[in-house]
Amino acid sequence: MSEQPTVSAEELEQLGDEALSAEQLERALQHYGEARRLLCEALDLVLGEDADFEVISMITDDLSRVGEKAHDVWSRLQPPPKSHEEQAAELRAMVDVSMESGDLAHASHMSFRLGETLEDLGDLENAESAYRQAVVLAREVDASDPELMLAAFASLIHFLSPSEESVALAEEMAANLIDRKEMYHPMRAAEAAYHCAIAELEFAEVNPHRVDHAMDAIARPTIKMLDDICFHERSQALQRLAAEVLRGVGRDVEADQWQADAEPAAHSFAA
Amino acid sequence: MNGLQQQNFRVNLGGVIALLSKNLYSSPGVYVRELIQNAMDAIVARDTLGGDPAPRTISISPYGVASPDSPANEFMITDAGIGVSLEQVEQFLATVGASSKRDELEQSRRTYIGQFGIGLLSCFLIADEITVVSLSATGAEPIEWVGRSDGTYTVRTVAEDIPVGTTVRLQPRPDMIGWARAEQVSPLVQKYAEFLPAEISVMTSQGPKDVSREYPWVNDFDAHRSGVLQGVSPVYGGMGVGRQFDAIEVADADLGLHAVVYIGAASRRSKTAARNRIYVNDMLVDDAEGALMPPWAFFAWAVIKSTKLEPTASREALMTNATLAMTRRKLGQAALKWLRSLADTDPERFAEFVADNELELKSAATQGVDADNLELAEVVLPMLTVQTTEGHMRLVDVAGHNPNILFAASVKEFRTIASFNPGGRIVVNAGHTLEQEVLLMLPQVMSGITVTRAYPASEVAALMVPSADAVGEVLALEQRATQSLTASGCRVVVRQFPSPDLPAVFIGRGQIDMASPGYGDLAHLVVNWSNRAVRALTRTTDDLVFSRLMQLLFVQARMAGQCDGPEDRILLSEALDDIILLAAGVDGTEVTR
């Protein structure tokens, strides 16, 4: 009976390095994997024996180094990521297939993802078109998928420059998700109000006569709504945005107050 | 009082326009439908003048798309219809409620789509100003009419040379731009007007896109159905409606009806995609779908092409009248006929359909009392599969065994009966949702059928008593056993179960034999004379052993019937202790006899 040759983790790592130099990636990955297994076993052993810290940290250093090498090789073995163009073509095809099969919700999801991809590609005209199509479909899907309404509308609202239209879209979304019983959920409603408030505040920044309306009629109740369900990060983000808007229109004193409200801890410390 | 003067109401026109345009319609998108409708009616009206037929083209240039005739910052629609002259402007464009089609309405309702003279107002949903440029086919000068949402308008003749027909231009308000862009306009045109007998094109950044097509089933229904059966999703308004189980053609010349009723596949039934579509004079009536199929026909939806149904002013509902009632009836009948024919010709597929829709079918067939419900029940109920003491069976087969169908009203009672009665009388489990309703409705839809509730006691009563030559042994067993269970207040009777497996069954209440009236509220332990262990008990001479074994049998039967309580656990524990001690005689301990 032949005896199994014993190879140490160090030797396996070296074999892996050699295979890597020879561009034999799969073999290298195999050696590194074996080395990691041996190191893990060794670590279990020393942990059970209450070994000293130095030994443990030596093994964990080895483990982490071999792990990184294995990950690098694994990454090189993966097919190259799809280009944005390929992703866009795939998403377009998925929109068409979903439309034909009647899965309008999926078509809408794919459509705003297509919008994001085209936006990354810098094709803003077609990105806008895709975002708009997602909204058209989300309107069709309506109460069957309120999350979709939130996602599709929010994507288009934030894509568009602050305008009457972005505000109108935000109001339409909020009216659906807040006022309609079949679509209402406190967290979703607060999220819709949050996006609506952002649209209002951003539009107010370029239309100073709307600032008071945006602050008092929109932002304040939305912040309360967000705080009521413990979305404090969101409410603070909104307070900071409100401060920016106020500063942008030269109302620095109010802006300081909103900024201070957004950072309660820092404020009390400074005081 | 003398000299009474008749006066007119003063109307705030701007307010009326806002009221009509913003409250009449459910979505800003309807302006597309109203404008196409006006364009189509104008084309039809031009045909009535004689001469060459009007070009049946409608062109739309949405906001954001620049075309030779329309800048990018406006929405435009052009038709080659009859047009309007300066005189007609006053009458038709500037008078709310006047329609050029009203006079001929009664005699040729099928010819025109619009009827109320308010469609143009819907444009104020997205724009504050409507510009109409038109040249009448009757030979007058071209005109330009500009109406505003405050109720004012201007009109002038124009010198430009324009073709016969009408162009409407809108500059959408900044907040409504999205409703006038191609991404929204194209699907709206497809949704409302893809089947109009005209060539409708929508300008896009890639060029004009033709929207018009024929109903997918109108020329060759068999080909359409074949596609549906192969899993091809029908497409309406540019959107698929998912896989359908089947499609049925419905035509009735008297009702002006040509339709397809789709039978939805249960797993893919989606309210979003597969909903009724009603085209009146080939234009979709929005959101009227609830009015079409009878409520029991949950499995079906229809696409109908009608020339006689009448939409309301908003075109978002149908007038409730005899035509609608007869159309509904016709479509419901078609769905029922399909079900009946499927049951007769393709039992396997019918069974698949029933299995997919069982709960909904039970509900639809048993709720409501109209004739259609009854017809649905007649087709569906006998084919439903139920749980019986003989396994799963169709109701029609249960009735074939015994026209007096027996049912247990609760799952617990059914389990008790099924435990001692396999191979005996067939009893149906009606303990689940709607099963009793289904059974109780059965006599109305299957002639000669009666339905009776079975109780565990009544089923015991139907069991055979052991043969006469064993009567001595049986009586002795009954007496000894009843005595053993005196403390539990339970009477023991002996019967012959169809199967020898079960030794005993506990019947909590009910009269189990005619020979012992007055025992209706007494609990019974019914022991099985065919069971080996029970027969062995009769040979036990030791009264203590017999008594403890009977107590064990009693507790076991109560546990099987899920009616045991803490007292049973005590009895079980005591009886088991005694049996062990009697059997093993541990340490010579004496059991108190």
Image (spheres, coloured by chain):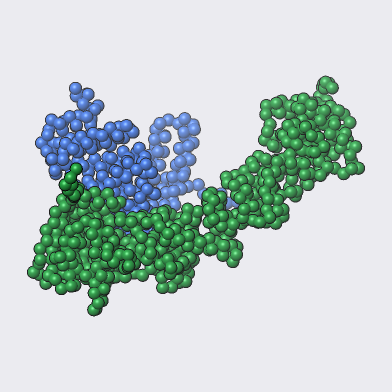
Chain colours: A blue, B green
**Image quadrant containing the N terminus of chain B:** top left
Q: Nearer the viewer, residue B95 or B131?
A: B95
Taking the spot 34% from the left edge, 61% from the top edge, the residue there is: B284
Q: How many marks?
A: 0
View extreme (front): residue: B2
Residue B60 or residue B209, whichever sits in front:
B60
- Tell me where residue A86 sits by quadrant: bottom left
Q: Is residue B565 above or below residue B265?
A: above
Q: Looking at the image, which residue is at 75% across and 27% down?
A: B488
| Residue A118 placement, left or right of B320 | left
Query: Residue B240: x and y, percent?
Result: 39, 61
Q: Quadrant of the C terminus of chain B?
A: top right
- Taking the image as drawn, is residue B466 in sight? yes
Give left or right: position of B15 versus A70: left
**Percent x, y for residue B271?**
42, 53
Q: Camera-side residue: A173 or A28?
A: A173
- Identity of the residue furthest to the left in this view: B159
Give residue B121's position: percent from left, percent from top: 22, 55
Q: Residue at x 43, y 57 (%)?
A: B292
Q: To which quarter of the image does residue B314 belong?
A: bottom left
In the drawing, does residue B400 fall left or right of residue B67? Answer: right
- Using the image as rendered, state which of residue B370 and residue A133 is in the foreground: B370
Residue B553: percent from left, percent from top = 77, 34
Residue B302 at least partly seen:
no
| Residue at the spot 89% in from the left edge and 31% down from the top edge | B541
